[in-house]
Image (spheres, rainbow, N blue to C red):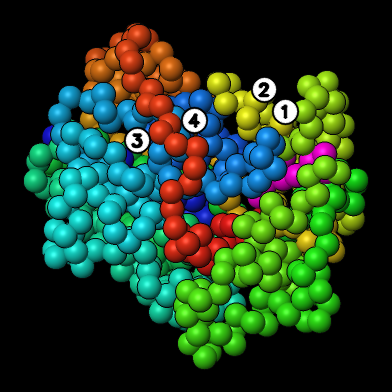
Amino acid sequence: MTTVVLGLDGAAFELIEDWIDSGVLPNLAKLTSEGAAMDMRSCLPPVTSPNWRCYASGVNPGKLGVFWWERVNRETHTVEPISSSEQFDGGEYWDLLDGNVSVINLPTGSPPSKVNGKFIAGGPDCEQTEYTHPHGLEDQLRDEYDYQVHPDHLSQLSKDNQENDCVDEIHRLIEQRFQVLEDQLESGEYTLIHATIFYINVLHHFYWDRDVVRTGWEIIDEHIGTLLESDELDHLFVMSDHGSNRIEVEFNINTWLEEEGYLVRQTGANDLMKRIGITRERVLPVLNQLGFRSLARQIVPDRVKSRVPDSEGRVKKQAKSELIDWEESTAVASGQGPIYVLTDSTSERRAIREELLEELDGLRDRTGTLVVEAAKAADIVYEGPYVDDGPDILLDQAPNIHISGALGSDRVFVDPDTWAGENKDTGLFIAYGPAVDPEATVEEMNITDIAPTLLTLHQEPIPKEMDGTVRTGLFAEGTEMSKRIPQDDDIRWIKQKTTEDDQTGDSVNSRLADLGYIDE
């Protein structure tokens, strides 16, 4: 018998509850009525990286050493990309299970882990090759399923156009993930199978609740029905790395920092390009129409491409290092909320942090719309050896707000640009199976709670390093799991990061840009 964990990137009841109630998603309706279903908090910021690692390890970003898709290095005055699994500390709970495991399509999972079983790394960060353990599994996936890690036409995605090849490709990729999952479940070889459906959240981002998103969820629901019919299924857990909601206002945090005197920008070619009308909005449609966009990526240096501004004057993440005046600036932000104070003085760093906390907490735009739900000191939210290297402040963005970390816009608040849907820190969690109490209510379920809870389900010890709480209240009264007192075990489990450098190539950065992840 097998435990299946189905990870649905960006899933939230806010989006799907009407479809559940109206009968569009009957199998999810079954899970929510016969299982234990609840909201679940992700770690801040609510982003794919680091939250899939928070789930797998049961620890917070302060122990992982990764806080978003980029690292602001105060010592070298650089903004560095983060996407390799080797840049994270933290183990994976399935390494502690007795028996074979299979991990399918895990984001931030490349290079793949050498698990006792099979590991398939997933998007958005891994390459189209060298993504499996064992190595030969990649050829098997390609031969049996025509398996792809990513769609071929990501650059076609646009919130203004849902009729494109990429949407159809994403629907096929969702089918592929489930085909692999279902075949592995029926094999009876695995104690646990984890599978992530990553690209459903890409549809959320670009199309929010439109028909193409509902179609994606109908595919997911149909395959959940197949899982529930399997005699090999013991327990099914459905979870997300974060939630989603519609974007109504985009908050350019670095423009705000600039206006308030915390950030000073180097002026240069990007300002000139904006003034004479050379912007990404004008250039990219022409390249797409002529079929030259992929060619341009190959022959134009990244340093040049990243400095072409959008219509707001914003430049991409790769250009941040060059556009920040590091000597004059005292703060800079990443997308979706992390703010770094730039000073070597501990006392000055603390003073600037307190100023920013006071100014940003409860911030509203000129219409009175709440923009920042709460501004939080990172050393209160996080704990671990990497807290001091990370951001000083975390912004919990208000509903329907997207915080952009791009540089160069003239306006603090703008209408949504690339995305229609944004991440939020409330995702979902559903537990279903013979040991689960369907009436269970768990207050403030956190993504880090899943790993120790699953270890308890499988009667394994809990490493002391884990931050999550074992949610024994999920289990039916009288079961072994409901009575078990979790024991912290002093086992050597946390893996040490093997590099500080990003090992991914230009194709990964281009893909993250197409998805809107590193336009911040």
**Quick one: label 1 or label 3, which is nearer the N terminus?**
1
The segment highlighted magenta reads: 329-339
Q: Secondary structure at mark 4?
A: helix
Image coordinates for residue 216, horizontal then vertical, percent: 39, 64
- The residue wearing badge 4 is 64
Q: Secondary structure at mark 2?
A: helix
Residue 380 is tagged as: 2
- The residue wearing badge 1 is 377
Mark-to-mark CA distance, 4 and 3: 26 Å
- The residue wearing badge 3 is 431
* Residue at 69% from the left image edge and 51% from the top image edge: 321
Q: Secondary structure at mark 3?
A: strand
Mark-to-mark CA distance, 4 and 1: 18 Å
Give the image quarter of residue 206. bottom right
Residue 238 is tagged as: none
For the residues carrying marks 1 and 3, which lies nearer the camera in this image?
A: 1
**Quick one: label 4 or label 3, which is nearer the N terminus?**
4
Name the amino acid, label 1.
Answer: Ala
* Residue at 83% from the left image edge and 77% from the top image edge: 275
Name the amino acid, label 4.
Answer: Leu
Mark-to-mark CA distance, 4 and 2: 16 Å
